Amino acid sequence: MSAAMIMFNTMLPLLFLAIAGMIMLMSGVFTARDHSFAITGSAIVILAITARLIFAAPDGEVFHGLYLTSDFTRFADMLVLLGAAGALSLSVAFNERTGITRFEYPVLIIFAVVGMIVLISAGDLLTLYLGFEIMSLALYVLAAFARNNLRSSEAGLKYFVLGALSSGILLYGISLVYGFSGTTNFEGIARALTGSAAASLGSTVGIVFVLVGLAFKISAAPFHMWTPDVYEGAPSSVTVFFATAPKLAVFALLLRVMLGPFGPLFMQWQDLVEILAATSMIVGALGAIGQTNIKRLMGYSSIGHMGYALMGLAAGTLMGIRATLIYLAIYLVMSLGTFGCIIAMSRKGRPVERIADLAGMASEDGRYALVLAIMMWSMAGIPPLAGFFGKFYVFAAAIDARLDILAVIGIITSTIAAFYYLRVIKVMYFDTGSPGFDRRSAGINLVIGVSAIAIALFVFYPAPLSTVSSLAAHALFPSQGF
């Protein structure tokens, strides 16, 4: 196979997704009638085709290392595509109920996914920043998608201001790394940091700024301040997307950057990652206790979950990376299931977001209450559900890397967090409330049903996820045995 054909096959999934997104945009602009439902369905099909093309794409790098593919990027891409498809499936009925059904929603999600795939496969700091900005621009618009809603506009403004700040911090860190290493290529940076640049204070400061810029996007504390407000203010169909695909994409990039080009300075940045992990777990556990809005509760919950996932990065071992990938996959399914239940909370076409409004749900709709209970139990890390195994893997990796204090903090915060997860179950099963929840669409039922089955039955069949996460972890460091 010629070099040109290899390059084409490698870039085909990204090209297909970008061109399909532009065709969707043009069809929406130049069509007189509203075809939002058809465009959303087409977007899901496009994501499925993209997944097939990604599986068929060869491993390797193109454009002199600017863009690369491997089992690791393939694993992360699949999680992103699954998160985007799940968000689109959940959005149809919600957007129609709330009057924000517009063709721009699936188009923006497609373009955001384009940016995510670029940054996941980035082999250079410039490609990284390009993908980061493509993703961010689409997310800024999505946060304020309900333009006639004051809370949504406020969420969009907050996310834009803080997102621009994080982008500036990231770009400043990139400039410092380039200045002291002399290159923006990942492999070149790793070689430079192994040599004379390793002793440079400027290189370390640059790495810290890059880490902080990416920590904003995954809402790791203390850079989490946007998360609860944006989760609450943005439409629920947008919030479910924010909680899944972008975080997984940026976290995958974080793993590649910190343990790839910045790997030679692991001892210099390990303590900072430990602090981010510990702070995120503590803030996530304590911040959610007093919340009455379930979307704000999930915002703080996501902060805590990012802290648990960061434990694997802090370990810096093959076991730690594998544990983090498993945790992120489980977190994706839990988030889709939980937000599916949140989106289903509506009375007479109006969204219901207060935890107290779940009172009596078990007697009115036992199946729905059971699904949400499974998600809450899993997020609390209670066996035998998948959430327990996700935490078990990251705790074991931390202990194996002699990060005992971090593991203890994780166990304590998990115990604290169990309070507000179990409170939701208590409200559904033991409190009395007014009935009258609306019927749920087929898309919502499918997403929450599949999510509940996957979370409940993971204990019986963990091998597929364990195997592919191991392959992805090994692909991240093919020459290192750890």
Image (cartoon, rainbow, N blue to C red):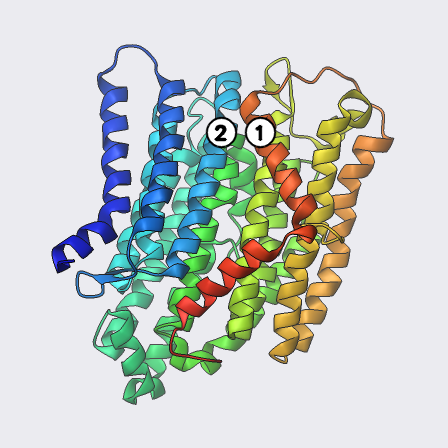
Direction from residue 423 to residue 261 in the image, left or right: left
- Circles 2 and 1: CB distance less than 8 Å? yes
Q: Residue at x 21, y 73 (%)?
A: 183
Residue 304 can be seen, yes or no: yes
Residue 168 in percent (x, y) is at 33, 57
Dot 2: what SS?
Answer: helix
> Viewer-proximal residue, 171 or 131?
131
Crowding at mark 2 (Cα within 10 Å: few <14, some 14-19, many 20+) = many
Quadrant showing the N terminus: bottom left
Residue matched to label 2: 89
Residue 95 in percent (x, y) is at 48, 22
Residue 439 in percent (x, y) is at 64, 16
Residue matched to label 1: 446
Dot 1: what SS?
Answer: helix
| Residue 402, numbered label | none
Badge 2 or badge 1: first in the primary sequence: 2
Direction from residue 434 to residue 216 in the image, left or right: left
| Of labels 2 and 1, the one closer to you | 1
Q: Residue at x 74, y 38 (%)?
A: 373
Q: Residue 52 sits in which quadrant? A: top left
Q: Indicate the amino acid at tag 1.
A: Leu
Q: Is residue 384 above or below residue 264?
A: above
Gap between marks 2 and 1, in whole Å?
9 Å
Q: Residue 207 sits in which quadrant? A: bottom left
Q: Is residue 350 above or below residue 316?
A: above
Direction from residue 431 to residue 159 in the image, left or right: left
Q: Indicate the amino acid at tag 2.
A: Ser
Q: Residue at x 51, y 37 (%)?
A: 239
